Image (cartoon, grey):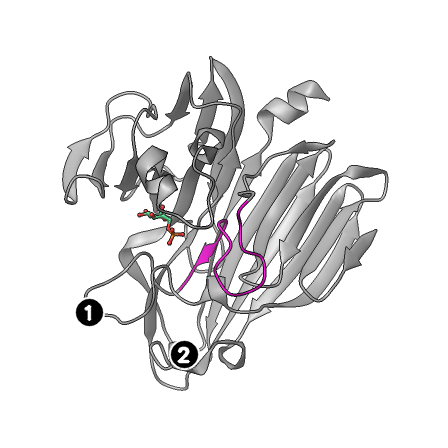
Amino acid sequence: MPFTADKDTFHAHLAANAKTGFTVHYYGATVSSWTVNGHEQLFLSKKAILNGTKAIRIPLVFPQFGTVATSKLPQHGFARCSFWKLTQLTESGDQLAATFTLTPDQVDPALRALWDYKFELAYDVTLDGAAGTLKTALRVKNFEADRTFDFTWLLHTYLRVPTLSGLEVQGLSGFSYTDKTRQLQTFNQSGAITITEEVDRVFPSVTPITAPLQVVVGGKPIASIERTPGKGSNGFADVVVWNPWADKAKGMADFGDDEYHEMVCVEVGDVANPVKVGPGEVREAGQVIRAVAAIAKL
Ligand SMILES: O=P(O)(O)OC[C@H]1O[C@H](O)[C@H](O)[C@@H](O)[C@@H]1O
């Protein structure tokens, strides 16, 4: 597997095609780039802070989604602001797979004290060059002797899109959602989601988990996300759709004022109900992102 690495990042690409690969920052195990034959699939702000002082905006969320009144953990937890280790690397035909892990000794002690359990969190990133997919999966093991822990977690994917004009997020029609832009009121999603203002919607229990979530622009599919089951889990139950729109973008130091036109977050996780994991148990869930538009251009 051709790869390059420095103290901050790990980059791997296909032996037969240097334009198909991915880059992961050890800080947050953040996948900051995924290219399919030269076409970038993910959004990374030009103003992203990459020096390990602030979570990069394509984060892994663990052990807490958002902020919680009863918890002092920072928004989205500590996984995204901890340095992960590369622990496995494999190549097989058109597939490249890397596993990154996080254990309590890698977490800032002040943050660890706020969720103080013996755990190992693993993040598998698998690129399939022939299928045009990137599979990412989170796996947690509870190493406590007799304590169950619970958490919320989420894969906070920032998809790169050509424009928001004519963009639809499909696959959520008929499901109810909590609207974080409207005092957490509940609404019913009717038809596809379009983005003409700030959107921050949490959809609990989107079933079946096998149904793909699609991003379509001007009637053309751009990307799809499918949730995948794993050990001890049928797959992530919930879906979040987010775009900051103009005002919020202006307030974010690590995000360009106009860049909200270039991205949409379609996030899969368990955020409505915490996941409980008993001593010695493992929970795993993931997603497959399909670069539909890039495959069409090949
Ligand atoms: O700015 P961040 O802490 O990275 O969070 C970015 C966004 O993440 C999720 O999508 C939440 O639902 C949003 O409420 C939040 O604004």
Above/below status of 102 relative to 256: below
Quarter holding residue 238: top left
In the picture, the disc for residue 87 is none
Q: Which residue is mark 1?
A: 70
The reply to whether the magenta stretch includes residue 292 is no
Q: In what quadrant of the picture does the C terminus appear?
A: top right
Q: Nearer the viewer, residue 149 or 298?
A: 298
Q: Main secondary structure of the magenta part?
A: loop
Residue interval drawn in magenta: 47-62
**x%, y% of residue 12?**
75, 50
Above/below status of 199 relative to 148: above
The reply to whether the magenta stretch includes residue 58 is yes
Task: Give me the residue at 55% from left, 38% from top.
Answer: 289
**Mark 1 crowd level (few <14, some 14–19, many ≥20, 10 Å Cα):** few
Using the numbered discs, state the Cα–Cα distance from disc 1 to disc 2 in whole angstroms. 16 Å
Q: Nearer the viewer, residue 215 or 255?
A: 255
In the picture, the disc for residue 112 is 2
**x%, y% of residue 229?**
47, 49
Q: In the displayed orientation, state which residue is furthest to the right.
A: 16
**x%, y% of residue 96?**
73, 49
Task: Give me the residue at 30% from left, 34% from top.
Answer: 198
Name which of mark 1 and mark 2 comes first in the sequence: 1
Assign a secondary structure to mark 1: loop
Assign a secondary structure to mark 2: helix
How many numbered marks does the figure carry?
Answer: 2
Quarter holding residue 171: top left
Task: Tell me if 257 is positioned left or right of 240 in this view.
Answer: right
